[in-house]
């Protein structure tokens, strides 16, 4: 079927008594074809489906933009001028993110200032969704993407986003048994700063801890040996990040469970690591989690950990927070 025939068939579907799940599947198949044969119609339908019923995604706008930038831009600017994007109560339009993401990636090498401006125009709490649309990043754009995110997002946010893309390949997706030397080479190649390394490794370790907490909540074993192996891997990649990353991971595990058994496991694990040479950074996330209410670790136990802090000024500050 050509574009006109397929467009008519898609439109006629609306009047047919078709079971909704089957209709959605068939329409998605038709729209997939129409992205090439009648992209203006296809992407207009994606918007209607996404904003009115939540059915389906928003297509491969990046491919249309690369194939025919003038037509894609003309269509998108018409949508903006017609104010077709639904807005939340605070005036934001989440459905614009995949389109804006496509423009950012198309400009990131040729006009990085324009790409940065588009990113800055996105509300800060929507910028994190940018990562949903850039999981596969061409090698020639990887450094430019890292540079852009450094300028437009807080460290913890952009390293978490990068970890889920192909920029850093496989090394930071919870595979603590992968080659640490390979991980170090990747970090060095992108000139990843000490703060970025710590945030990246803490995010990786936390993902593992969250998974273990989920297994424990279903009756599984916390598997201390796996915490030990993960910590060893982080130490091999970047020794200066290991204590902070371990503390953040234990705090994540605690937050996800918040039961007395998790208190015992986390406290013993933290103290064992402390006895094995870990520093103050390992204890801080657990103590601050109690102080700010993000976990239910008892204050008396948190005070016990706080009293282990070797930095007197820091120890007193944390104890004050626990009052």
Image (spheres, grey):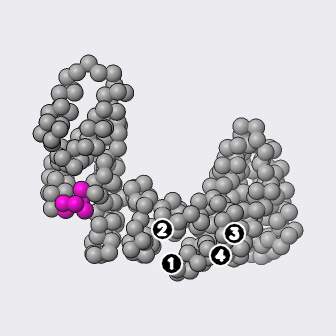
Residue 118 seen from this side: no
For mark 2, give the secondary structure.
loop
| Other residues around mark 1 within 10 Å, as few (<14) / some (14–19) / many (≥20) | some
Residue labelled with disc 4: 181
Alpha carbon distance from label 4 to label 3: 11 Å
Mark 4 element type? helix
Would residue 119 appear left or right of 1 to someone viewing this image?
right
What crowding class fits label 2: few (fewer than 14 Cα within 10 Å), some (14-19), or many (20 or more)?
many
> What is the CA distance from the residue labelled 4 to the residue labelled 2?
17 Å
Query: Residue 105: horizontal and vertical position, in percent?
Result: 33, 65
Q: Distance between the residues labelled 3 and 2?
A: 19 Å
Does label 4 or label 3 sit earlier along the sequence? 4
3 left or right, relative to 218: left
Determine which quarter of the picture holds residue 52: top left
Specify the segment rendered in magenta: 64-69
10 Å crowding of disc 4: few (<14), some (14-19), many (20+): few
Q: What residue does disc 3 label?
A: 234
* Front residue (pair 317, 74): 74
Q: Does the magenta portion include 161?
A: no
Residue 269 lies, in percent from the top left, at 82, 58
């Amino acid at each position: 079927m050509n574009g006109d025939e397929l467009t008519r068939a898609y439109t006629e579907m609306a009047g047919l008594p078709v079971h909704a799940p089957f209709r959605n599947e068939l329409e998605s198949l038709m729209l997939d074809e129409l992205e090439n044969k009648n992209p203006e119609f296809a992407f207009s339908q994606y918007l209607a489906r996404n904003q009115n019923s939540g059915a389906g995604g928003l297509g491969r706008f990046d491919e249309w933009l690369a194939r025919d930038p003038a037509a894609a831009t003309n269509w998108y600017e018409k949508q903006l001028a017609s104010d077709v994007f639904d807005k939340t109560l605070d005036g934001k339009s989440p459905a614009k993110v995949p389109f804006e993401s496509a423009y950012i990636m198309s400009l990131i090498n040729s006009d990085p200032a324009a790409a940065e401006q588009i990113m800055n125009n996105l509300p800060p709490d929507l910028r994190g969704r940018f990562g949903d649309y850039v999981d596969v990043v061409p090698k020639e754009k990887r450094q430019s993407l890292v540079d852009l995110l450094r300028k437009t997002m807080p460290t913890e946010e952009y390293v978490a986003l990068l970890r889920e893309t192909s920029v850093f390949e496989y090394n930071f997706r919870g595979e603590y048994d992968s080659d640490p030397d390979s991980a170090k080479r990747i970090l060095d190649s992108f000139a990843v700063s000490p703060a970025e390394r710590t945030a990246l490794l803490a995010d990786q370790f936390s993902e593992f801890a969250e998974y273990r907490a989920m297994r424990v909540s279903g009756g599984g074993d916390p598997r201390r040996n796996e915490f030990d192996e993960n910590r060893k891997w982080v130490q091999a990649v970047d020794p200066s990040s290991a204590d902070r990353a371990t503390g953040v991971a234990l705090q994540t595990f605690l937050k996800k469970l918040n039961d007395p058994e998790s208190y015992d496991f986390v406290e013993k694990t933290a103290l064992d690591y402390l006895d094995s040479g870990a520093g103050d950074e390992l204890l801080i996330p657990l103590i601050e989690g109690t102080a700010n209410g993000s976990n239910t670790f008892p204050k008396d136990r948190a005070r016990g950990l706080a009293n282990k802090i070797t930095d007197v000024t820091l120890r007193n500050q944390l104890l004050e927070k626990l009052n």
